[in-house]
Amino acid sequence: MPATSPAPGRERDREGGRGGGRRIAADLLLALGLLCLEVLAAGYTLLVLAFGSREADPAGAATVPPFDWSPIAALGGFGAFALLVAVLAGRDRWWITTVAHGLLAAVLLLGAAAAGVGRQHDRQPPARPEPLPSGYTPCFSGSGRCN
């Protein structure tokens, strides 16, 4: 039975010989480059979502806005992309990229889940104050007519 040789480039990794330092440097540069691109894309997306055009109520009434899933979907999408990069980098043994993107995916996906749960109580309209009694007179400073 013929012996199978490892994939190209893998024999050097097992020997720990030439190219180990270059591979770590390339892994670090790949991780930093991808993280910078992801931060720029996520920052731009979240800024557009945060400061994008919102329709104002024409009557000026104080209403509770409908729940907006866009920021949560954006966080989840970037988290899923970071998880995909981590899985693909792990398959090729780019360990620094795998760990960095795995941590980023965990933070983004947990943040999206927490934002979705945390916004549910914000949708409750504010409580209306109790009506004042009919014989109530406000207390003004120096009037001497306070309840």
Image (cartoon, helix red, strand yellow):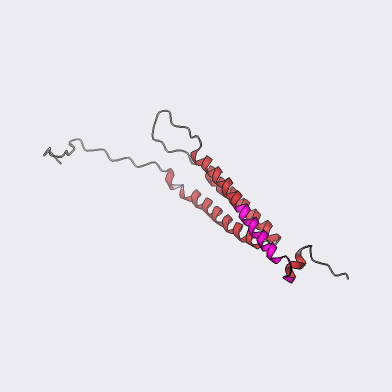
Describe residue 125's horizontal placement relative to residue 135 as left or right. Answer: right
Q: Main secondary structure of the magenta part?
A: helix
The N terminus - image quarter: bottom right
Considering every residue shown, the one lying at the far top of the view is 58
Above or below for 2 versus 129:
below
At horizontal 71% and vertical 60% (from top left) the residue drawn is: 92
Residue 141 colored magenta? Answer: no
Q: Quadrant of the C terminus?
A: top left
| Left/right of residue 127 with respect to residue 37 in the rendered view | left
Residues in magenta, as a range:
15-35
**Can residue 68 be seen by looking at this rendering?**
no
Q: How many marks?
A: 0
Q: Among all residues in the image, which is located at the extreme right? A: 1
The residue positioned 73% from the left and 70% from the top of the image is: 17
Q: Is residue 114 depicted above or below 5 in this figure?
A: above
- Give the image location of residue 45, x and y in percent: 56, 43
Residue occupying image coordinates x 53% and y 40%: 48
Q: Nearer the viewer, residue 83 or 95?
A: 95
Residue 132 visible in the shown view: yes
**Is 123 placed left or right of 19 in the picture?**
left
The percent coordinates of residue 124 (x first, y second) are 41, 43
Q: Compare residues 13 and 29 and report the one nearer the observer.
A: 29
Q: Where in the figure is residue 40, as x and y percent of width and height? A: 57, 47
> Magenta includes 28?
yes
Q: Position of residue 68 (x, y in %)?
A: 50, 41
Tell me which residue sits at (23%, 38%) in the image: 132
* Location of residue 107 by image quarter: bottom right
